[in-house]
Amino acid sequence: YDRFMKTQQAISARRLKRKVGTRQQVIIDSVGPAGAIGRTKGDAPEIDGRVHVASRRPLRVGEITSVKIEAADAYDLRGTAVGF
């Protein structure tokens, strides 16, 4: 099991790192003191990774915003809301 999980983490990390430097449309699922959390098109909140979003303005749950992806790990992306 551990061997398969390590392989899956490596595959996921490679796939997500390709998104670094791109702009992605992100739907905001929650907002808290540390920023917003959302997901990209086609991602399911129950099983897929998250996008941690920093923003200069307040974001609202359900809002779709353009996010410049700045970092990735095995499961999640990090970025900043842009275009407003």
Image (tube, rainbow, N blue to C red):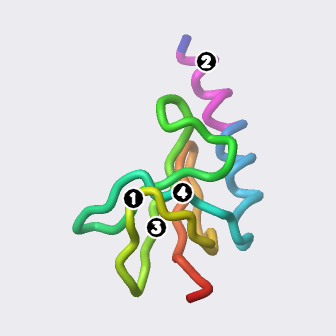
The residue indicated by pointer 4 is 27
The residue indicated by pointer 3 is 53
- Span highlighted in magenta in the image: 2-10
The residue indicated by pointer 2 is 3
* Amino acid type at image mark 1: Val
Q: Alpha carbon of mark 3 to alpha carbon of mark 4: how far?
A: 10 Å
Image coordinates of residue 80 in percent, x first then y, are: 52, 76
- Among numbered discs 3 and 4, the one appearing first in the sequence: 4
Q: Give the image quarter of residue 8.
A: top right
Task: Determine crowd level at label 2: few under 14, some 14-19, many 20+ residues with C-alpha closer than 10 A.
Answer: few
Vertical arrangement, residue 12 with respect to residue 46, above or below? below
Residue in view at x 54 percent, y 57 percent? 27
Front position among marks 4 and 2: 4
Magenta highlight: main SS: helix
Between 51 and 30, the residue placed more toward the observer is: 30
Q: Alpha carbon of mark 2 to alpha carbon of mark 3: how far?
A: 31 Å
Q: In the orientation shown, which residue stands out farthest toward the left?
A: 33
- Among numbered discs 2 and 3, the one appearing first in the sequence: 2
* Amino acid type at image mark 4: Ile
- Tag 2 secondary structure: helix
Residue in view at x 53 percent, y 50 percent? 76
* Amino acid type at image mark 3: Val
- Among numbered discs 4 and 1, the one appearing first in the sequence: 4
Image coordinates of residue 42 in percent, x first then y, are: 68, 42
Image coordinates of residue 1 in percent, x first then y, are: 55, 11
Q: Are marks 3 and 4 in contact (CB under 8 Å)?
A: no
The residue indicated by pointer 1 is 61
Q: Alpha carbon of mark 2 to alpha carbon of mark 1: how far?
A: 37 Å
